Image (tube, rainbow, N blue to C red):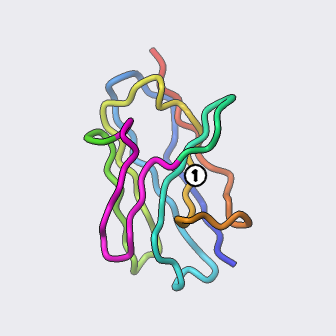
Amino acid sequence: QVQFVESGGGLVQPGESLNLDCAASGSAFKIGTMAWYRQAPGKRRELVAGITRGGRTNYADSVKGRFTISRDNAKNTVYLQMNSLKPEDTAVYYCNTDPFLQSSWGQGTQVTVSS
């Protein structure tokens, strides 16, 4: 069983930046591809960015060029650097594996972009 704890969210104005952290525990040594997901009110959860254990990344079109995912395998931690934030980035952000483990969703961290 793998558990994830997300942190770093907050309230920012459009154009500002935030950095999210996700710490994995439990059977973390088994983790391959990690990913950040988000869910906005009334919308389905979507994959934002993913990163393989070797560092290969992929991004949703809506965040390409603005968000950067990275990971530290030694610390079992994955990061999401978010720049040039937009109001439509407002959501609860979660990390999980890709494909996700249904039983491992954490509480997420709220990101609100508003002027």
The amino acid sitting under disc 1 is: Tyr
In the image, farthest residue toward the top: 115
Q: Is residue 105 left or right of residue 110?
A: right
Mark 1 is surrounded, within 10 Å at the Cα level, by few (under 14), some (14 to 19) or many (20 or more) other residues, namely many
Corner quadrant of residue 70: bottom left
Percent coordinates x, y for residue 25 in the rendering: 60, 75
| 5 or 105, nearer to the observer | 105
Q: Quick check: 33 above or below 69? A: below
Q: Which residue is mark 1?
A: 94
Q: Is residue 98 left or right of residue 75?
A: right
Q: Quick check: 43 above or below 47? A: above
In the image, farthest residue toward the right: 103
Q: Residue at x 37, y 49 (%)?
A: 59
Q: Quick check: 23 above or below 75? A: above
Q: Is residue 50 magenta?
A: yes
Percent coordinates x, y for residue 58 in the rendering: 35, 56
Percent coordinates x, y for residue 83 in the rendering: 31, 37
Q: Is residue 54 magenta?
A: yes
Element class at badge 1: strand
Corner quadrant of residue 41: top right
| 112 or 45, nearer to the observer | 45
Task: Name the image quarter holding the C terminus.
Answer: top left
Q: Residue at x 54, y 84 (%)?
A: 30
Percent coordinates x, y for residue 27 in the rendering: 61, 83
Q: Residue at x 64, y 75 (%)?
A: 2
Task: Name the image quarter holding the N terminus.
Answer: bottom right
Q: How many marks?
A: 1
Q: Residue at x 53, y 50 (%)?
A: 37
- Magenta segment: 47-63
